[in-house]
Amino acid sequence: MGEFLHSGLEVRGSAESLELIEKRGKIAMQCLPVQRSDTIYWVKTQTVMPSKANVATIHVADYDIWHKRLGHVSPKALSKMPTSTQKFPRVQTLKFIPICPGCAKGKMKSRSFPESQSRATRLFELVHSDLKSLPVESYHRFKYFIVFIDDKSSHMWTANLRKKSDTSRAIKNFEAMARIQHGATIKDGKSIKGGVYQLRSYGYPKGFRYCD
């Protein structure tokens, strides 16, 4: 919608339809919902011959455009598209392939963390924890999960959460499990992402110290 507005089109409509209007008043595009109660509008289009199309971008797109459109495909794979895909235009082969910033950043390796020389000497002496959100809410309506990793044994526990405010209860349950089942007290707890996972705001139990 923003691309259309910046290109000079105007929006006019209601719950029944949305219309994109050109400056001279001609309707450039119309969007309609399948049902009146829907909040998703579908673009109403029709197939036209290339000779009747105002802009046939498929026939003028260069290597850089197709490289981005197809998810940063390699030059070798793009060169095979005309023979393996119906009606795919021939892309001009470049002698010098420009460096794509997106591809370059995607192939960069992150500098590894320095290995720690210290290790916990007993169970639950040091616990690492992190809180993550799920991209899609689960069937049982869980949106978050919290992870606890024991530094001594590398054993991991997870707990599913419906709300981020349930973190306090999850930490208290984990602390109670360590105390009742293993007779241990958490001496030090470290959050992997302090900016996102603020233990202070949830009231962590005694013996579970927050560290940035």
Image (tube, rainbow, N blue to C red):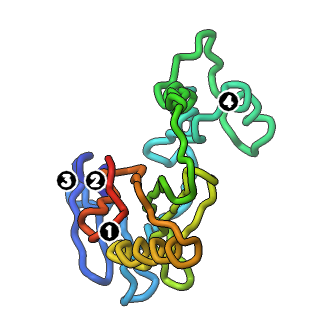
Of residues 62 and 154, the one nearer the viewer is 154
Contact (Cβ within 8 Å) of mark 4 with mark 3: no
Q: Is residue 5 visible?
A: yes
> Gap in Å between the C-alphas at discs 4 and 1?
68 Å
- x and y percentages locating residue 201 in the rendered image: 24, 66
Q: Which residue is mark 1?
A: 206
Q: Which residue is mark 2?
A: 2
Looking at the image, which residue is at 49% across and 55% down? Answer: 125
Which label lies toward us, 1 or 3? 1
Q: Which residue is mark 4?
A: 90
Contact (Cβ within 8 Å) of mark 2 with mark 4: no
Q: Which residue is mark 3?
A: 23
> Gap in Å between the C-alphas at discs 1 and 2?
51 Å
Answer with mark 4 or mark 1, whichever residue precedes in sequence. 4
Under mark 2, the amino acid is Gly
> Gap in Å between the C-alphas at discs 4 and 3?
35 Å
Please determine whether, in this image, residue 187 is positioned above or below residue 159.
Answer: above
> Which secondary structure, mark 4?
loop
Under mark 3, the amino acid is Lys
Q: Residue furthest top?
A: 95
Contact (Cβ within 8 Å) of mark 4 with mark 1: no
> Gap in Å between the C-alphas at discs 1 and 3?
67 Å
Left or right position of 195 against 89: left
Under mark 4, the amino acid is Arg
Answer with mark 1 or mark 2, whichever residue precedes in sequence. 2
Please determine whether, in this image, residue 91 is positioned above or below residue 159.
Answer: above
Under mark 1, the amino acid is Lys
- x and y percentages locating residue 69 in the rendered image: 54, 41
Looking at the image, which residue is at 55% across and 50% down? Answer: 151
In which image quadrant can residue 14 be found?
bottom left
- Using a 10 Å C-alpha cutoff, classify the residue at mark 2 as few (fewer than 14 neighbours), some (14 to 19) or many (20 or more): few
Answer with mark 4 or mark 3, whichever residue precedes in sequence. 3
